[in-house]
Image (cartoon, grey):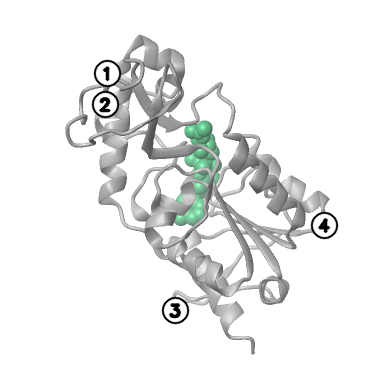
Amino acid sequence: MTGSNPTGDGAISLPAEIINAVRWAEHVVVLTGAGVSAESGVPTFRDAQTGLWATYKPEDLASVAAYRATPKLVWDWYAWRRELVTQAQPNAAHLALTAMQDIYTNFTLITQNVDGLHQRAGSHDVLELHGNLFRYKCLLCDQPATVDEWRHRSDVPACIHCGGAVRPDIVWFGEMLPSRPLAAAQFATRHCDLFLAIGTSSVVFPAAGLPLLAMEKGALVIEINPSETDLSDSAQFSIHDKAGAVLPALVHAKRNPN
Ligand code: OAD
């Protein structure tokens, strides 16, 4: 395990093993969590909710049972989150990951985030394990749905196929992850030589199992997170600093090999 060593001028000094790994890696897999969007002003999942929503726990809103019992409350919570994310901008970490996608021939970005900020930064083929706030489907018939976000800011829309309530296409508590992105994430993880786990508390499976799978298959796992997590003891390196500071330094190390 290691920490980064801020040099005082805002730049980050990284251990040689990490610099070499970033320079020589051929297949890089990145897993991101809510921490990668923290510097864009999007609160992390386990942060206390602010303002109006401070008294609710996400666990009590993000479930089929909650939506059935109080559809308007759950819809309004997601409308608030969409608004917050719409006003946020991708940060230096999101941008560094788009640079990595261009630098490495084999690069896979897996995210647990539902905010779409990776795509807004320019990342493509992002494997979204937990869905997306801006996609919808029917609670009853599961068909994809289109929503006029302005008109439906505070009304629960009805499915045009069956009349059921439209819901965000997000993985709620108790639900399975979408099988295609999960299978693609596991495949890439099994074949990578460098795995970066960024801004995730590493407590929610199956996403939290990906770095462990990477290690089992012989990849080097580097965690980037200002705090200790459940992964910190097992990852070969833990850089305890912000993603927006560390990722640009990794890109710099790869681009300037001397
Ligand atoms: P969490 O909110 O659990 O964890 C966010 C992590 O980001 C924490 O470990 C912070 O220390 C770290 N962090 C904060 N600021 C950071 C920064 N600037 N740079 C790097 N790291 C930073 O979020 P997730 O791990 O993404 O699932 O949560 C995983 C899943 O739990 C979510 O996707 C959600 C929830 O259940 C579903 O909704 C299905």
Using the rendered image of the protein, determine whether residue 202 is visible from the camera's viewpoint: no
Instruction: From the image, tell me which residue sits under label 1.
Output: 72
Kind of residue indicated by mark 3 = Asp
Q: Quadrant of the C terminus?
A: bottom right
Q: Amino acid at mark 1?
A: Lys
Q: Position of residue 55 (x, y in %)?
A: 33, 23
93 in relation to 252, above or below: above
Under circle 1, the secondary element is: helix
Residue at disc 3, CB closer than 8 Å to ligand 1: no
User: As drawn, is 142 to the left or to the right of 198?
Assistant: left
Asked if the residues shown at circle 2 and circle 1 are in contact, with their CB atoms under 8 angstroms apart, the answer is yes
- Distance from disc 4 to disc 3, alpha carbons, whole Å, reads 35 Å
Residue 218's disc number: 4
Residue drawn at 27 percent across, 34 percent down? 80
Circle nearer the N terminus (4, 3): 3
Report the residue that reaches farthest toward the top. Answer: 69
Would you identify the image quadrant in which residue 176 lies?
top right
Q: Looking at this view, name the residue that lies furthest to the front.
A: 161
Say whether disc 3 or disc 2 marks the residue closer to the N-terminus.
3
Query: Which residue is denoted by mark 3 in the rendering?
Result: 9
Q: Which one is earlier in the sequence, the residue at label 4 or at label 2?
A: 2
Farthest-out residue, bottom: 258
In this rendering, which labeled residue sits more in front, label 4 or label 3?
4
Q: Would you identify the image quadrant in which residue 238 lies?
A: bottom right
